[in-house]
Image (cartoon, grey):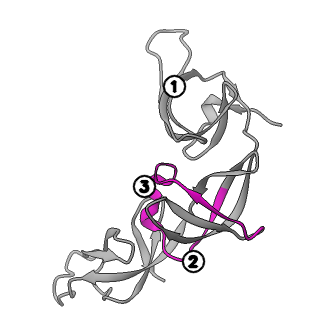
C-alpha cells in the first residue's frame, strides 16, 4: 500500500494517524522563515468514528497510510429525531448516521438521493456527497426585466431542503437547479 506524504494532503482525503482513521478537513502549508527549517503542514482532521475535530501539525516529510475504508453506494431514505437513515444499495441493509457524523452535508439530502458511504471495518461511519445534487426551488422573487445590466445578475432562492442560494434571474419557483456540493453554488438548471 502506498503511503501519502504530508505535502500531498488535500481536503476530504482519508489518512491513518496513530492507528486511527481521519478525514482531512483543512490543510495549511506553513513555510518556515529560518534557513534549513522544514515546511510544516497544519491540518484540521475529523475522526471517522467519533466525528471529533482536532488540529495537528506535521513535517512535510511525514507519511501516512490509507485507512481500511470501502466506498459503497447508498440512498438517503429519511431523517427523524434519532438521525439520518440510509440504505446500502449493494446489500439493501438500512443503517443510521447521527447528526454529528453527517454535519453540514444534511442540507443537500432529499429523499432518494444517491451518495457514497464510507465503511470502516465493514461499519458505515460517514458519507461522501456527489459533486452535484439536483434540488427544486421552493421560493424566489420574480426576476425583473431590465435589471440584468451587470450581466451576471442573481437573486436569492430557497431550495426544497432549506438551503439558501443565489440563482440567475431567469430561474422561477418549481424549477430544478444543479447545486455544487463543494462550493454550495448553483451550477445551472438541471
Q: Residue at x 35, y 82 (%)?
A: 137
> Residue 18: horizontal and vertical position, in percent?
66, 24
Left or right: 25 in relation to 158: right
Q: Nearer the viewer, residue 9 or 123?
A: 123
- Tag 3 residue: 104
Give the mark nearest the N terminus, 1 or 2: 1
Above or below — where is 34 with respect to 53? above
Q: Callout 2: helix, strand or loop?
A: loop
Above or below — where is 172 with respect to 47? below
- Tag 2 residue: 112
- Tag 1 residue: 56
> Residue 44: horizontal and vertical position, in percent?
48, 34
Quarter location, residue 60: top right
Q: Callout 3: helix, strand or loop?
A: helix
Spatial CA span between label 2 and label 3: 18 Å
Q: Callout 1: helix, strand or loop?
A: strand
Above or below — where is 54 with respect to 140? above
Spatial CA span between label 1 and label 2: 37 Å
> Residue 8: horizontal and vertical position, in percent?
63, 36
Q: Nearer the viewer, residue 78 or 5?
A: 78
Q: What span is colored magenta in the figure?
A: 91-117
How packed is label 2: few (under 14 Cα within 10 Å), some, or many (20 or more)? Answer: few
| Disc 1 versus disc 2: nearer the observer | 2
How packed is label 3: few (under 14 Cα within 10 Å), some, or many (20 or more)? Answer: few
Above or below — where is 82 with respect to 122? below
Amino acid at each position: 500500500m502506498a503511503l501519502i506524504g504530508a505535502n500531498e494532503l488535500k481536503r476530504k482525503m482519508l489518512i491513518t494517524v496513530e492507528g486511527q482513521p481521519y478525514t482531512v478537513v483543512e490543510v495549511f502549508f506553513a513555510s518556515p522563515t529560518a534557513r534549513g527549517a522544514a515546511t510544516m503542514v497544519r491540518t484540521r482532521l475529523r475522526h471517522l468514528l467519533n466525528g471529533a475535530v482536532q488540529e495537528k501539525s506535521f513535517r512535510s516529510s511525514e507519511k501516512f497510510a490509507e485507512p481500511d475504508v470501502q466506498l459503497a453506494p447508498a440512498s438517503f431514505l429519511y431523517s427523524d429525531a434519532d438521525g439520518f437513515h440510509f440504505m446500502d444499495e449493494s446489500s439493501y441493509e438500512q443503517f443510521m448516521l447521527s447528526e454529528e457524523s453527517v454535519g453540514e452535508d444534511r442540507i443537500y439530502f432529499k429523499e432518494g438521493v444517491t451518495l457514497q458511504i464510507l465503511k470502516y471495518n465493514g461499519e458505515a461511519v460517514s458519507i461522501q456527497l456527489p459533486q452535484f445534487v439536483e434540488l427544486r426551488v421552493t421560493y424566489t422573487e420574480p426576476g425583473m426585466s431590465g435589471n440584468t445590466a451587470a450581466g451576471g445578475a442573481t437573486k436569492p432562492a430557497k431550495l426544497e431542503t432549506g438551503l439558501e442560494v443565489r440563482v440567475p434571474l431567469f430561474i422561477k419557483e418549481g424549477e430544478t437547479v444543479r447545486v455544487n456540493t463543494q462550493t454550495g453554488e448553483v451550477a445551472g438548471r438541471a
